[in-house]
Amino acid sequence: MAELSAAEAYRILIGSRIRSQLAYRASFWLNVATSVAVGLVEFVEIYAIFANVPVFGGLDLRQSSLVFALSNIGFALADTIFGQLDTIPTYLRLGRLEVLLVRPMPLLLQLVTSEVQMRRLGRLAVGVLIVVIVLPGLDLSYTASTVYLLVITPFVGAAIYGAFFATAGGLQFFLIDGAEFTSAFVYGGSYAGQLPGSVLITPIRILFTFVFPATVAAYLPSLLIMGLPGPRFLPAWLGWFAPVFAVWAWLLAWLAWRAGIRRFTGAGG
Amino acid sequence: MRTYLVLAAAEFRRYSTYRLAILAGITTQSVFGLIRVSVLFAAISSAGGTLAGYDRQLASTYVWLGQALLAPVALLGWIEIAERVSSGEIAVDFARPLDLQLAWWARDLGRACFQLLSRGLPPLVIGAVTVGLAWPDSWSAYPLGLMSLFLAVSISFTLRFLVNLIAFWTLDVRGFIGLYLVVGSFFCGLFIPVHLFPKWLQVVAYATPFPSMLQTPIDVLSGWVLGWAAAALVASQLAWLVGLVGLARVVQWRAARRLVVQGG
Amino acid sequence: MTSEPIVQLEDLRRSFTVRQKVGRLRRQTRVVHAVDGISASVQPGEAVGYIGANGAGKSTTIKMLTGILVPSSGRVRTCGYDPVPHRRRLAREIGVVFGQRSQLWWDLPLRDSFRILGAIHRLSAEEATVRTEELVDRLGLADLLDTPVRQLSLGERMRGEVAAALVHRPRLLVLDEPTIGLDMISKERLRHFLVAERAEFGTTLLLTTHDMGDIERLCDRVLVIDRGRLVFDGTLPSLAERVALQRVLVVDLPEPSPDLQVSAAAHIGSDLDGQRQRLAFSPKETTAARVLAEVSAVTEVVDLTLEEPAIEDIVRTLYGVG
């Protein structure tokens, strides 16, 4: 008899989670509403800045909004897929990880597919809406490279932010009580990534470009799309290498994850 | 009264055991603080050096005070009461001879005192060392500031108390808490000062108690307002507190009735 | 054909460093030897009971042989694999039931859990269905398939857990305290099923338990662990011999009475002024029925209980003797 392929297995797993979430009507839609509110409130922050000054980090409201929206779409995707890793501290406390370890599936994948946070997609909707609104006014020339960047950026962004979630997850095995530490780069990264990277003061700029590449998730590709130059340490052409940065981010995540598992199974001593 | 003091002290001690969490919180606060400082500095330099009364120093003070007060004013959420409602333990609390709201209020003040020291001092130090802080011009800022802080924590507590009490009527409080957090932290001025909001948004903000939870104590402590203007702000906080406490009493009474009627 | 042991432990050790606060600020470090040099091997098809007091090292051993924990030293091989490095390959050959932790999806119907596990084990839809139906039938789960797992009683859930662990037909089934908290009927059903399953498929069984009834019903062999060391490894009859396992019949009489004198049993205690009396007897020499018959001949019996030998007593005896 044919063995089920890995893809089929994941499909069944994820399908069941999605179905189970949609079953809880009221609570689900309230959560979606919260997610939309999060997206809106974060945007209002950008909007409020521009109510005071016409140019911020070298960008105007429309341009800044593009950065914001692309970043948010990417983060919302990452949160939907990888957000479940936030529950690792709880799993650790309840001893539920052992049950997962005796299954023939990688632990990370099991955790990731154990829940799909459909409600986070509310935030994604806000991002998409903003893109749709500002794109016409930006007066872009739709060359092949522009279109390519517009399409690929949210996904590469999702990969980068997803790596942050995974890194945080791996570190949870070390940080039983210090889980808050990881918010610094997961949610801090999301925050830094939705702003024009040029406003970030140098040490933060370097942290969120070369260690946790949040500025590469949306800002640099946006500069390329709009044909603008970048600030110090952050030349626009780096945006073409966003996928490389994503790989780098996942390398860090993989190391953190491996170290975490080794710590959990006692191999680290 | 003594019981309430004991409760406050116990909560103080309870929070002091989470040392690693404190260190982690400090790191996160620093990162977020530096990002926020970046945002305000960029906006200010774009505006030519000052923006709505904020220069770089004042802006830096604003951000670091915000980070310092984040924990004591519990802007990151708190659902202990809601959890006790869903587990049913709340019945025990009601059975005790202490008033539910006052008891938790005392505990919250204990927690706030501890977090003022553990989470409040480090950001101020970091801020002073990295980008510089402004100090208020008048001595009256300090006692007024302390009063403002006390009122801010209490307002925050009462609001959280109210939100937690929603647990008596619906099962899923988390959704409401999440919404409360997002909206509340924006309107209290955590991201950018309420003074920088467009006029129409400011009107909306001041129609809520949120600014008095964070923006007002920061304004008083940083010396953004002085003297009688500051006193007036503190008075407005008091007004909000009185109103909210009144509302909370009513809701608590109805919640207690619901508990009795439903049987827990 | 060489018979490779399905589980092999060679001088297995595992220690933990525990840091305790002594006084206000200082920390004291202590090394706890949870498993202190255990050697044993289990042949395919055996049914082994693994007993010991709480904290004796049973769970730690299980964790090491299922790939959850790495040994501090010594060697462990399960189904021929080194458990931790080959965790996922090993997971295809073994099924594990943790008595206190559920592997089922809490908010989904039982049926979905089986389906998902079938997918995780990469069974084709047909294979999974056939196997699931078989297990459902033999464990009496048919009526429960559409109930969300969180609404099941403990007994029903445990049957579901055992079924879930066997969906992929593992060679080795490891059960960590499976009957804890179960009522007699559920225990009996589970035991009956496991005996039948072994008879039909030759699944090796490794069971940790506090319940001697489990051991008697299911296991040919017993390992007794105390403070990290193996103090007995042999058959149940030889354990009974070593330890002179005694049963205690507790009888409730209609009114306070003097101590009963019974030839088949020894009177070891009276409560409530003699209204409740405890009679110890050795199962090798007589049966509970015979003791009861003798008591009934002398007086009316209002109620009775049969007590099993306690693990702690067994261990104490073993340690004292050997």
Image: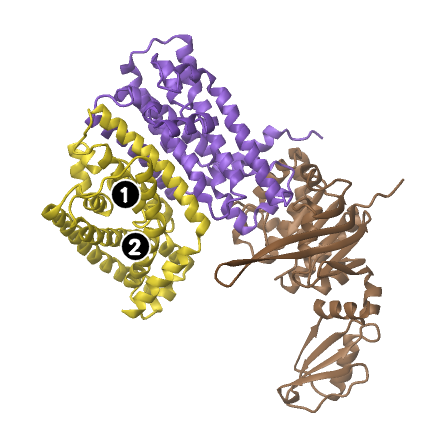
Chain colours: A purple, B yellow, C brown
Per the model, the C-alpha gap separating discs 1 and 2 is 24 Å
- In the picture, residue B27 is in which quadrant? top left
Q: Tell me which residue sits at (41%, 60%) in the image.
A: B88
Check if mark 1's residue and mark 2's residue have beta carbons within 8 Å.
no
Horizontal and vertical percent position of residue C198: 77, 50
Q: Residue furthest right?
A: C1
Residue B170 appears in the figure: no
Q: Which residue is mark 1?
A: B65
Q: Is residue A204 left or right of residue A41?
A: right
Identity, as a three-letter code, of the amino acid under mark 2? Phe
Q: Which mark is residue B175?
A: none
Q: Nearer the viewer, residue A173 or A105?
A: A173
Q: Chain letter of disc 2?
A: B
- Across and down, in percent, residue A46 comes to 27, 28
Q: Nearer the viewer, residue C28 or A257?
A: C28
Q: Is residue C306 visible?
A: yes
State whether residue A200 is above or below residue C239.
Answer: above
Q: Quadrant of the N terminus of chain B?
A: bottom left
Lateral position of residue C175 relative to residue A107, left or right: right
- Within 10 Å of disc 1 (Cα), the crowding (few <14, some 14-19, many 20+) is many
In the picture of the structure, the residue carrying the numbered disc 2 is B161
Circle 1 — which element? helix
Q: Residue furthest bottom?
A: C258
Considering only order in the chain, which callout, 2 or 1, is on the residue closer to the N terminus? Answer: 1
Residue A40 picture quarter: top left
Q: Mark 1 belongs to which amino acid?
A: Leu
In the visual, does C316 lie left or right of B81? right
Image spot of residue B71 (x, y percent): 33, 48
Q: Is residue C307 above or below residue C268?
A: above
Pick out the residue farthest to the front.
Answer: B129
